Image (cartoon, rainbow, N blue to C red):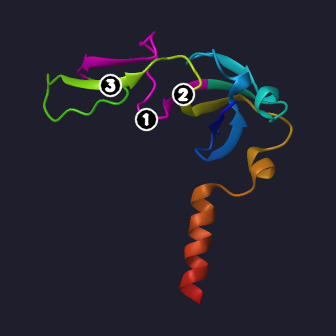
């Protein structure tokens, strides 16, 4: 099986990444709740909020097929310059499949350990610490 990058965001706004085997997540849809035990974070409960496929197309909740070119005015993956402007964009469907590269999760129920304790520092903090170390030397 392939690996999926799982991005978990907590209530304070920090996010944590983990590579996970995709077999437990395939077939799940945006808006579903999943137990943290499935991805190795015991005691937590998550909400699937989105993601992207291997080509970088964002997942949309309203698309039921694998990938589609839609004509849209606003929403996930759409940026317009003027009021009333429509844009044709390719987006991925709402179901996690083998070609899904990243899945975004939101914490609904916290476990006994905090995510900071489980994963250590966030990516942003690690980069800030690296830049500070480089500036000192």
Mark 2 lies on residue: 99
Mark 1 lies on residue: 55
Calculate the distance from the C-alpha at mark 3 to the C-alpha at mark 1.
10 Å
Calculate the distance from the C-alpha at mark 3 to the C-alpha at mark 2.
15 Å
Residue 91 position in % (x across, y down): 37, 24
Mark 3 or mark 2, whichever is nearer to me: 2
Q: Residue at x 35, y 17 (%)?
A: 68
Label 3: which secondary element = strand
Q: Residue at x 68, y 23 (%)?
A: 25
The image quadrant that residue 109 belongs to is top right
User: If you read the primary sequence from the N terminus, does the residue marked by circle 3 or circle 2 appear first?
Assistant: 3
Q: Are marks 2 and 1 in contact (CB under 8 Å)?
A: yes
Q: Residue at x 26, y 34 (%)?
A: 79
Q: Are marks 3 and 1 in contact (CB under 8 Å)?
A: no
Residue that sits furthest to the front in the current view: 1
Mark 3 or mark 1, whichever is nearer to me: 1
Mark 3 lies on residue: 90
User: If you read the primary sequence from the N terminus, does the residue marked by circle 3 or circle 1 appear first?
Assistant: 1
Residue 134 position in % (x across, y down): 57, 82
**Residue 93 relative to residue 9: left or right:** left
User: If you read the primary sequence from the N terminus, does the residue marked by circle 2 or circle 1 appear first?
Assistant: 1
**Residue 80 relative to residue 36: left or right:** left
Q: Which residues are magenta?
A: 48-73
Q: Residue at x 62, y 31 (%)?
A: 106
Calculate the distance from the C-alpha at mark 2 to the C-alpha at mark 1.
8 Å
Q: Quadrant of the N terminus?
A: top right
Local crowd at mark 2 within 10 Å, few (<14), some, or many (≥20)?
Answer: some
């Amino acid at each position: 099986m392939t690996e999926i990058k799982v991005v978990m965001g907590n209530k304070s706004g920090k996010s944590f990444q983990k590579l996970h085997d995709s077999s437990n997540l395939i077939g799940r849809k945006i808006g579903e709740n999943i137990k943290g035990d499935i991805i190795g974070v015991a005691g937590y409960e998550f909400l699937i909020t989105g993601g992207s496929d291997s080509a970088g197309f964002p997942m949309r909740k309203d698309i039921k097929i694998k990938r589609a070119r839609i004509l849209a005015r606003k929403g996930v993956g759409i940026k317009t310059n003027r009021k009333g402007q429509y844009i044709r964009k390719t987006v991925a469907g709402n179901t996690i499949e083998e070609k899904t590269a990243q899945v975004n999760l939101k914490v609904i129920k916290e476990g006994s350990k905090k995510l900071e304790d489980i994963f250590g520092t966030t990516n942003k903090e690690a980069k800030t610490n690296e830049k500070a170390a480089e500036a000192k030397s």
